[in-house]
Amino acid sequence: MQANIKWLDDPETFRVNQLPAHSDHPFYRNYREWQEQRSSFKQSLNGTWQFKFSPNPQSRPKDFYQKDFDASSFGTIAVPSEIELSDFAQNQYINILAPWEGKIFRRPAYALNQNDKEEGSFSEGKDNTVGSYIKHFDVEPGLQQQHVHIVFEGVERAMFVWLNGHFVGYAEDSFTPSEFDLTPYLQEKDNVLAVEVFKQGTSSWLEDQDMFRFSGIFRSVELVGIPANHLTDMDLKPTVKDNYRDGVFNAKLHFTDQAAGSLHLVVKDETGQTLLEKREPLQKTVAITDQEFPDVHLWSNHDPYLYQLLIEIYDEQDNLVELVPYQFGFRRIEINKDKVVLLNGKRLIINGVNRHEWDAKRGRSVTIADMTSDIHTFKENNINAVRTCHYPNQIPWYYLCDQNGIYVMAENNLESHVTWQKMGAIEPSYNVPGSVPQWKEVVVDRARSNYETFKNHTSILFWSLGNESYAGDNIIAMNKFYKSHDDSRLTHYEGVVHTPELKDKISDVESCMYLPPKQVEEYLQNNPAKPFMECEYMHDMGNSDGGMGSYIKLLDQYPQYFGGFIWDFIDQALLVHDPISGQDVLRYGGDFDDRHSDYEFSGDGLMFADRTPKPAMQEVRYYYGLHK
């Protein structure tokens, strides 16, 4: 198969040769590697890559992926990083509108007319910047003589991949891992990896989030060695019985079918006591069924107790060939007959924030230091929950939330704001995904990727179908996907407020944005059909966030109200050097000659972009502290 640039125009082509999403579990060769937190099955490709920026598809080096290509005209770029923050392209912040509004006329394929494919819309787009990346590498010893995959943790926005001149695959979802099998084309020495990244494609209609519009390989890239006896996916189902005391453990483990062997599974508590031990022969699927755990220690924000799962995988000679450690907890979320959300049998109150991934110097290419700092800020200010607005976050974030008892609303990478809201008016004439058949599979795939990657994280209490994308048959299909795969969590989607006739098919909870306290109370006083939350409230632009007590007092009056997520946690601003003052300053939307813009709308966090708390954080600490 050859790469085809026309895929950029086709909403039905969104992954080519991409491996199915699977659980994000770590794996090591032995216990020493686990202890040292390094896996010889993995090889990082982060660092300096050769790079060529092109302002449009027409001017890109079309054959740069050939092994004998002369790349002497290429410069360099750091991976991971944002192309715009490496001074190759214009910074631009936009809230609702698409970047091309007022410059180029575009409509989503098939949205207005089932015969309108919008051919050439992006593949010939004069505004569609392109980054051409080249990386030379040798395969490290730990990966030789086995299958090797490549994993891109995050690439905005559409990506073609070649190895040694051979086309490997294509991917679009910017915020979930994209994995490809390199084995057929890999050699031990002097491999040439080529990646072509387009800033725009049909996925741009689905990624119209309120944020700076970056592009490039902005998360880590690594090679992954796949041993013969490999755990490809695991699906853990720890549940809590009706007595809220005893637990039941179920697991489905999926393996490669390349070789025989055995597995040894152990579950230990925090003291190291073994609570479950199983030995099973390796098969394609191994099921651990209905294992009783009496008197479990329940996981919650105040007590994020995690059990240690260890899966040892042996070959036919009884040699340990793979070790999979994973921590999980027992917790139960549900809605009772009175429409009250319960966690472990007790009323759940969300003291939450919406959190974009952000670093003042690196944009969305955040670091572990950023994440651990944010967790510390959560703890310090009585914040117990986070909505991953409006896309899946880096994998380590979910582990930090597990370990620190942060309740997670895990949101899909979906926002199509520009297709249904025009100059403030609700006008969904060309809304996608809507009920347009050609846009169904791409959004269900995004739900699948979100679920399969993060399904084992105890901290996730809600699956969120996306943000501000109106509603229709395709959002219904996403909700059905989650319901058919996971009965241990609730689903959430706010956008169905615009189509109330679909409320019985979308979202387990009633969710609104910025509904004033009086209207919140009116809903709660009138026999609410569902529990109520504000997925965005207390908009913290400038020196705002006052009047929080009006919302918090409702928590004491109405148990069906379970709180919400403040918009938002951190400013989206960039630290740049001002040549006039000679100082480093934070700059916001509109500060980069990036018309059009919502200007300071990117500055609505409880913290400045350098992670300095704003005065509003004091109010949050006080009021969230009333319902810790």
Image (cartoon, grey):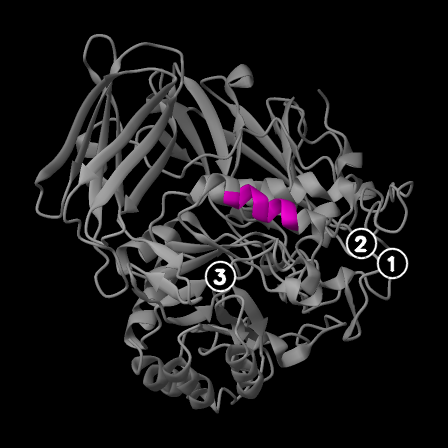
Q: Is residue 469 above or below residue 118?
A: below
Tag 3: amino acid: Glu
User: Quadrant of the image for the N terminus?
Assistant: top right
Q: Which mark is residue 127?
A: 2
Q: Position of residue 73 (x, y in %)?
A: 68, 40
Between discs 3 and 1, the one toward the N terminus: 1
Location of residue 579 in the rendering, given as x and y in whole percent from the top left corner:
59, 78
Q: Quadrant of residue 448?
A: top right
Residue 137 in view of the camera: yes
Residue of label 3: 357
Q: Which residue is mark 1?
A: 104
- 137 or 303, nearer to the observer: 303
Prevailing secondary structure class for the magenta stretch in the rendered image: helix
Place residue 494 in its image quadrant. bottom right
Q: Earlier in the sequence, mark 2 or mark 3?
A: 2
Q: Which element is circle 3 on?
A: loop
- Numbered range of the magenta stretch: 476-483
- Label 1 residue SS: loop
Q: Amino acid at mark 1?
A: Ile
Distance CA(mark 3)–CA(mark 1): 29 Å
Q: Is residue 403 shown left or right of residue 556?
A: left
Camera-side residue of 588 and 238:
238
Which label was assigned to residue 335?
Answer: none
